[in-house]
Image: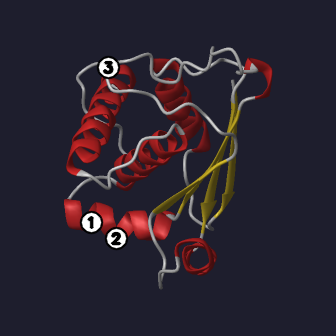
């Protein structure tokens, strides 16, 4: 699995830890091991520009997801991330880009009274789920996506720290 992390935000972020989280999420969801993912960390002006251009909304946002390939939408309770259908070419699965703004994440982390790294982990996981076809526009979708997101983050924290506490960032 190829996971590219590019930090253009000017904020010190543990890129190796972020790549390990992304690998954990993709492995858990059984995404093909030859899949490619890009995670880009940008500053507020860059995120504002992307937010306005692609979402038509003013100001910066926390995370944006830009899927690259047409993937089968994972079904709740089904084989999430299973791209083994007759038309799937597992050697060419470019999932897309997850773009995160650490400055916005820091504000949200303070509001939620948790660590900035924990917020960035949440945003990365959330973005990956969007790349895999999950959404939260409808109540049922919201419950499915956020339930999965919570489970993935809990298993990640358990893997990082034996006592289940997230690492400090």
Q: Using the image as rendered, state which of residue 88 and residue 164 is in the foreground.
A: 88
Gap between marks 2 and 3 measured at Cα:
34 Å
Q: Give the x, y percent position of residue 54.
A: 60, 71
Gap between marks 3 and 1 measured at Cα:
34 Å
Q: Which numbered disc, 3 or 1, marks the residue closer to the eye?
A: 3
Gap between marks 1 and 2 measured at Cα:
5 Å
Q: Is residue 141 above or below residue 48?
A: above
Q: Give the x, y percent position of residue 93.
A: 72, 30
Q: Residue at x 24, y 35 (%)?
A: 147
* Total numbered labels placed on residues in the image: 3
Q: Residue at x 55, y 45 (%)?
A: 14
The residue to which callout 1 is attached is 110
Q: Residue at x 21, y 60 (%)?
A: 112
**Dot 3, crowdedness within 10 Å: few (<14), some or many (≥20)?**
few
Q: Secondary structure at mark 2?
A: helix
Pointer 3 or 1: first along the chain: 3
The residue to which callout 3 is attached is 77
Mark 1 and mark 2 in contact? Answer it, CB < 8 Å: yes
Q: Give the x, y percent position of residue 18.
A: 54, 40
**Dot 2, crowdedness within 10 Å: few (<14), some or many (≥20)?**
some
């Amino acid at each position: 699995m190829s996971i590219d992390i590019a930090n253009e935000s000017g904020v010190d972020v543990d890129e190796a830890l972020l790549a390990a989280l992304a690998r954990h999420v993709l492995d858990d969801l059984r995404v093909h091991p030859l899949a490619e993912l890009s995670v880009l960390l940008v500053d507020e002006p860059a995120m504002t520009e992307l937010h306005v251009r692609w979402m038509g909304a003013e100001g910066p946002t926390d995370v944006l997801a830009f899927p690259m390939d047409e993937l089968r939408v994972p079904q709740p309770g089904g084989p999430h991330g299973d791209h083994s259908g007759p038309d799937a070419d597992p050697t060419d699965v470019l999932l897309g880009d997850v773009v995160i703004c650490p400055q916005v994440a820091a504000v949200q982390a303070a509001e939620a009274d948790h660590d900035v790294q924990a917020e960035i982990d949440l945003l990365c996981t959330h973005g990956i789920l969007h790349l895999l076809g999950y959404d939260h526009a409808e109540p049922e979708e919201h419950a499915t996506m956020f339930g999965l997101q919570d489970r993935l983050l809990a298993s990640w924290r358990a893997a990082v720290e034996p006592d289940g506490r997230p690492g400090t960032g």
